Image: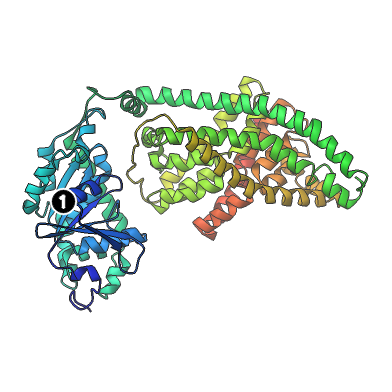
Amino acid sequence: MSNCHNNNNINYMDIKGRKLVLVGNPNVGKSVFFNHLTGLYVDVSNFPGTTVDISTGKYKDYVVMDTPGVYGVSSFNEEETVARDVILGADLILNVVDSVHIERDLFLTKQLIDMGKPVLVALNMTDELEKSGIEIDVNKLEELLGVPVIPTAAAKKSGMEAIMKMLPKARQGNRNPILADRIKQIAENTCSEAEALIILEDDEIIAKRYGVKTSGMRDELYMERRREVEEIVNKVIKETNKGASFGVLMGRWMLRPVTGIPMLAVTLYLMYKIIGVFVAGTVVGFTEETIMEGLYRPFIMSLMSPILSGSSFIGNLIIGEFGILTMVPIYILGLLLPLIIGFYLLMAFLEDSGYLPRIAALVDRMLISLGLNGKAIIPIILGFGCVTMATMTTRILGTKREKIIATILLGLAIPCSAQLGVIMGLISQLDVIYVFIYTAAILAIFILTGTILNKVMPGESSQLLIDLPAIRMPMLGNVLKKTLQKTMMFLKEAVPLFIFGAVLISVLQYTNTLVFLQRAMSPITVSLLRLPQETATAFIMGIIRRDFGAAGLSSIVMTQQQVLVSLVVMTLFVPCIAAIMVIFKERGTRDALAIWLGSFAVAFATGGIIAWLI
């Protein structure tokens, strides 16, 4: 066991004088306070053992230290680790809070108060409250926090004199009473109550420093603190339309069910018209039929035919029906690339506008009935772009239960953008009744699966805690940059798998194994699903990539009923190889195997039921 005097070897602890530490989230204006307090005599140097800059200066008998912007006192990265160590050594904390985003910033404020440090809160950017349509009861906030709260607009030097005057009156605030008892128990074996709190929140470095174990309570404590913050915010904030900008009003309309749901419906309809009708029809018609089939295929055949015989194995592999230089570029460049670019352009537009988080808040109550919370809408929407990427994004969810449910729903009922584009292209040729049956079937499986999992899995949905950025006009540069990055990621992942799939299918075809597999699967494809035997090839291709398989359906002659059944099965079918690998990595072998096999069973069972009912 160690003590605080011989174990803490951080150099800044040797600084003489009372340490006044500025703490706040990123971009809240701390540097303006620091400059106002210290003037021109500022020393900027790396924190010992790191590359993180720490600014220090003097104000009266205080040594003023600025910390990197952080959302909480923790040690997930180098900047947070430095901020944590500086805060632990503070004699007094000036906590700068962005009043426009007070719900986000108060998490850090409450954590500082729970540490037992004397705190003074600068409620900054109050000059922006009116146009944000927000009124804050400062006296009530001060009463609930138990520390002085000074309204400021640092950029206009408003409230700065009050801050300087109130510094000596900084005090310990209202700590969580249950937490305070636990902190005192742990503090008996450590240097301070602040360090005891950090250990309670599972900081292994500080725990190791004192030879004690972490508590494993981080998630529980964070959720409790979020609940406290929400309670405070509900008591001190009042929304008003007086003076509020159009963006603020628009953001509020997006959150209210009576206006938000119609706005969401219109957004989804516009996405369908742009992706499903314009891109999948007009654009793909030009890129696939005119360019790739009309110009590229004749060119590559005329170029390679004199060298390779189409009947030979190599010829079949290179320029055959599933050839590397025929099917692969035609599918990727002619069919999928326009759909991918279109989808990611729309996603980047929604993300940059600030609408995506509001959709999460809007659908929160609905997703709770499926065992999730509103935050799950982010991986679900991303899943329409790429299920692999979306599966990794389930890490943002609060509990293991939510991560498993979200992964199952993603793997089962969310088609990726490339697959969705092909589906839209095929489904747009069907009568309205078949479009309705397809939509109803996928929605029913999605809702039914989530509801059952919510009932049978122990636990409950966690609370939704999400930042709502300002509604703004998306910046074209950002939108194009995000679209380009995600499109390149798609190509990087898809091209090798498409080539692998083309080789595999070509080998199976050349050795007549494809015919054997088609016959072996005929009890399912022909007898159960009432589909042509050739659809087995598309399902095999779908295991490699679902869009690869869906694209394979487009070349098979089928009735409208058969197209409907094949699309339902392909949508519910197992995720592609890349997604399966990520699911095994994220969820473990047992859960991933259950998800994989379960997708097969649900897809064929649902397709079979529809095939025999229509």
Dividing the picture into quarters, in which one does residue 584 lie?
bottom right
Against 355, residue 328 (above or below) is: below
Q: Name the residue that disc number 1 marks.
A: 37
Query: Which residue in the rendered view is the most extreme toward the front?
Result: 40
Q: In this view, does 316 lie above or below 374?
A: below
Quadrant in the picture for the C terminus: top right
* 464, 159: nearer the viewer: 159
Q: Where is residue 2 in the image (x, y as percent from the top left)?
A: 22, 78
Amino acid at dot 1? Leu
Vertical side of 153 occupied by 495: above or below: below
Label 1 crowd bin: few (<14), some (14–19), many (20+), radius 10 Å: some
The residue depicted at 29 percent of the width and 67 percent of the height is 214
Viewer-side residue, 377 vs 51: 51
Q: Can residue 607 be seen in this view?
A: no
Provide residue 281's location: percent of width, then percent of height.
Answer: 66, 25
> Which of these two is toward me, 231 or 460?
231
Q: Is residue 335 left or right of residue 31?
A: right
Q: How many dots with numbers?
A: 1
Q: Quadrant of the N terminus?
A: bottom left
Residue 610 image-quadrant placement: top right
Taking the spot 66% from the left edge, 30% from the top edge, the residue there is 564
* Residue 580 percent across, percent down from the top left: 59, 52
